[in-house]
Image (cartoon, grey):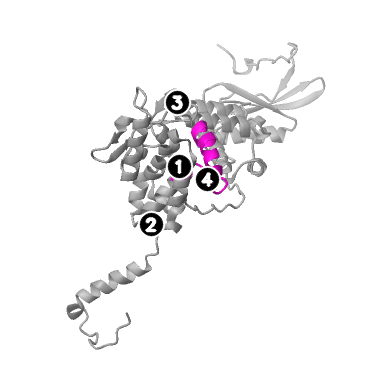
Amino acid sequence: MLRADSFRPPRSKDADGQPGRVEDVEESAMASVEKRVRNGRTTYEARWRDDQGRQRKKSFGKKGDADRHAATVEADKARGTYVEPSKTTVAEYARRWAETRPHRPTTARRTEMMIRLHIDGTRLGGRRLADVRPSEVQAWATDRSRVLAPTTLRQAVGLLRSVYGAAVLDRLVASSPVVRIQLPRHERERVVPLSVEQVAALARAMPERYRAMVLTQAGLGLRIGELLALRVQDVDFLRRTVRIEWQFTQGSKGERSEPKTPRSRRTIPLPRVVAEALAAHLTASPAAEDGTIFTTRTRAPLGHVYYGHNLMGRAVTEAGLPKGTTSHDLRHHYASVLLSAGESVVAVAERLGHEDASLVLSTYGHLMPDSDDRTRSAVDAAWDAARASCAPDVPQDAPSLR
């Protein structure tokens, strides 16, 4: 039977394999501090076991620092906020995070590029994940504001916030440093939609084979990928509707994918002007074997860059339209036409395939017609119809203000 005083703690070895001196050792499941002396230099080593039972350690030059670290570890373990020491950098974890996300192909490519150019390619990307402070994130955001557009900058900050949110859940950091980040003030420019005359001029400036694309996008409010993937079987000329089921993403090389959001799957009324343009186009340029309506002369699918940049860019210049006009302005035109005709915000959001009608209000609210006269007329008409029974105290011979 062992005597209580017969126990001696094992002598540790230095890095060179030689026995070292160890004092003040506590053999316990709790965090402990050991005094170590080697080559005349004294250090204090905090030892503890992580939540997986693995032993960890960290050296300090002062015993007080080691004691405080050991106490903090135990307190964090008790609160359930213990963070595993890791040498993982921000960029490394961001890439791992992106690989686990259920992103669509286009989103995955955009996320990978954002991480590669604006996280991995910066000083922040090389920092240890757990060492980053809010001030460093602010400095990073300020630096990125010099090279990124305001909207893209907000996307980059949002990406970093999501990365750190996942790191907190993985218990790699105790809290996220992406907090209270101040970004440059930005006010979105008001949309100035193209007029019908400008859209017609743009269509005339396009090569004849592609003129119907302009009228179709402007008359249905399609995103560029939805326009390029449109098929004959999606167009019901009899019922005068168009069903949006697919899109071509940038770089997809003719491979269809699901639309941007669930609400993007939608049925759109087919205006006469679009039906006539499509019928004439299909007569002159039959659809491809898979039904794709708009193709090259070799019957290959059109790409984003060829239509949205090459063809559209030349046509915009030839038609004398404002610099910076893109195919997306045809979508703005569609929304403005519906709103000016009195279509509801909810209906416009459904036609555009938006998830939330508030986006229509924030983007196109200034285009809505003045409703002051309609409000006055509605109230006056209601009271005029029931004047005798609802407003008996109003003198019938009172002078009219109308």
> In which quadrant of the rendered image does the C terminus lie?
bottom left
Mark 1 → mark 4, Cα distance in angstroms: 9 Å
Residue at the spot 50% in from the left edge and 27% down from the top edge: 251
Circle 1 sits in a helix, a strand or a loop, which is it? helix
Quadrant assignment for the N terminus: top right
Q: Which mark is residue 340?
A: 2
- Residue type at mark 3 is Arg
- Judging by the rendered image, the residue that carries numbered circle 4 is 319
**In the image, is 344 to the left or to the right of 75?**
left
One can see residue 175 in this view: no
Of callouts 3 and 2, the N-terminal one? 3
Q: Earlier in the sequence, mark 4 or mark 3?
A: 3
From the image, give the main secondary structure of the stretch colored magenta.
helix
The residue lying toward the viewer, choosing from 7 and 372, is 372
Q: Is residue 324 magenta?
A: yes
> Could you tell me which residue is drawn at 67 percent across and 43 percent down?
146
Q: Position of residue 61 (x, y in %)?
A: 75, 30
Residue at which label 3 appears: 297
Residue 366 falls in image quadrant: bottom left
* Few, some or many residues within 10 Å of mark 1 (<14, 14–19, 20+): many
Looking at the rendered structure, the kind of residue marked 2 is Ser
Q: Earlier in the sequence, mark 1 or mark 3?
A: 1
In this picture, which residue range is highlighted in magenta?
305-330
Mark 2 or mark 4: whose residue is earlier in sequence? 4
Q: Which residue is mark 1?
A: 203
Distance (Cα) linking label 4 and label 3: 24 Å
